[in-house]
Amino acid sequence: MSIEKKPLKVRPECRVTFSYRPGDGDRHRVELRGDFNDWGADSVPLKRQRDGSYRVTLSLPQGGEYAFRYLVDETHWDNDEAADGYKPNPYGSGENGILRT
């Protein structure tokens, strides 16, 4: 898993690329959910890459802080080890990753 951030020079936005690699190599449905998409109100599916990883790029406002997680096959939540930090989620079911742009 990884996160790449590229602040834009012409707009106050940051292009953030999220990459997720399942441990088993099987095909999965992977969605990115977080504060930036109201935790799924606007689905953000990751696209499977030739190497078996999944990837999506979003443009987010610079200077923001967002909680997020990956939802795999609509049953399993996973955090990104490259998150800027972690905080407990309000449901008592673990921690959410934190992204700072």
Image (tube, rainbow, N blue to C red):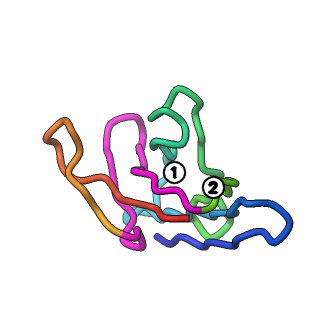
Q: Which residue lies furthest to the top in this view?
A: 41
The residues colored magenta run 63-84
| CA–CA distance in space, label 1 to label 2 | 8 Å
Q: Which residue lies furthest to the left in this view?
A: 92
Q: Residue furthest right?
A: 10
Q: Is mark 2 on a helix, strand or loop?
A: strand
Q: How crowded is mark 1: few (under 14 residues within 10 Å), some or many (20 or more)?
A: few
Q: What residue type is labelled 1?
A: Arg
Tags 1 and 2 touching, CB below 8 Å: yes
Q: Nearer the viewer, mark 1 or mark 2?
A: 2
The C terminus sits in image quarter: bottom right
Q: Is residue 68 left or right of residue 62?
A: left
Q: Which amino acid does label 2 sit on?
A: Arg
The residue lying at 71 percent from left, 59 percent from top is 13
- In the picture of the structure, the residue carrying the numbered disc 2 is 48
Q: In this view, does 68 lie to the left or right of 47?
A: left
Q: Position of residue 46 (x, y in %)?
A: 60, 50
Q: Is mark 1 on a helix, strand or loop?
A: loop
Which mark is first along the chain, 2 or 1?
1
Above or below: residue 73 compared with residue 87: above
Q: In this view, does 91 lie to the left or right of 36?
A: left
The residue lying at 59 percent from left, 30 percent from top is 42
Q: Where is residue 12 in the image (x, y as percent from the top left)?
A: 73, 60
